[in-house]
Amino acid sequence: MKPSVRLWTIAGAFFLGLSQVVSAQAFSHPLHPDPAAQLDAARAQRARLESPNQFGTNCCQILQIPAAYFQEIDHSATGYTSLGTSTGYVTLSGGVFAAEVWAPVTLPSGAALDFLDLYFYDNDAVNDICVDLWALTGTSSPSYTVLATTCSTSNPGFGYVSNLISGTIDNDVIDGGAQYVVVMYDFAPSSDLEFKAVDLWWHRQVSPAPATATFNDVPTNHPFFQFVEALVASGITAGCQASPPLYCPDAPLTRKQMAAFLSKGLGLYWPF
């Protein structure tokens, strides 16, 4: 079995099991976001894209989740999606409380969330199509928290709408983390309301500083304490001396040391 097929099989099994667990729940969705707030989010996106510092922890990683990744939340009560147009937009159909479908979010732990975006088609003068970002917690009876919502409010025709998110991805469900999904829905399913994809904008960040120091010469009040500790926790450095533990923060860096830092930090490897 090819790796991609195996991953889809695992993901499908997870969502099938989770769908069975939550199929009896009546999900509620938040009020539509303020259109002015969505416009402000779009302006903030443009400002970031115009910044020259689009690398590392600055900006801008985008996870795109196409319509083909979505499936029903409740296989017994909610209709399946159908292709709306040849452009790849999808129409929701059926549903008891609303037409709802969802898809997994595959972001690494530590990712800082920025924006939730929706590619949509809206030719309905009254109703909108919306997407939520959920954090699912718990095991036998998962609960969910809505982290962000964006809708096609006041945006007729084909469009792309944004809203702000704040928070950090934590995939460690054993120790208080969550499983993340995006949920697409509308309350008046028709060919006048369609979607094509969801974008999640995120950026990398340095992990918070620990309470205690690893090295005697980089104490907790050192201006570079957080960054040195992040290198240690990542396995990129073990310092310059073991006993007593020292980092030698002001020592010059040799080319061979630089090679070790960069190779470990970037995860460099031989192609195969």
Image (tube, rainbow, N blue to C red):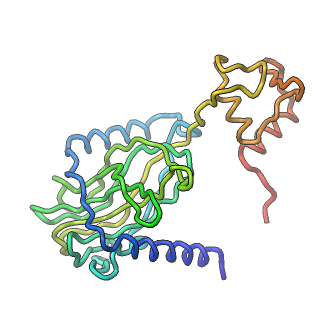
In the displayed structure, does residue 39 sit left or right of residue 181?
A: left
In which quadrant will I find the N terminus? bottom right
Q: Residue at x 40, y 76 (%)?
A: 20
Residue 239 picture location, percent across and down:
82, 30
Where 261 falls versus 89 (above or below)? above
Residue 229 picture location, percent across and down:
69, 31
Residue 82 picture location, percent across and down:
30, 80
Q: Residue at x 87, y 23 (%)?
A: 244
Q: Residue at x 56, y 38 (%)?
A: 205
Where 78 falls versus 43 (above or below)? below
Most extreme residue toward the front is 140
In which quadrant will I find the C terminus? bottom right
Quadrant of the image occupied by residue 236: top right
In the displayed structure, does residue 121 sit left or right of residue 127?
A: right
In the displayed structure, does residue 62 sit left or right of residue 77?
A: right
Q: Residue at x 10, y 62 (%)?
A: 125
Where 190 falls versus 111 (above or below)? below
The one of 252 and 173 positioned closer to us in this rendering: 173
Most extreme residue toward the left is 126
Residue 101 picture location, percent across and down:
33, 70
Number of marks present in the image shown: 0
The one of 45 and 77 positioned closer to us in this rendering: 77
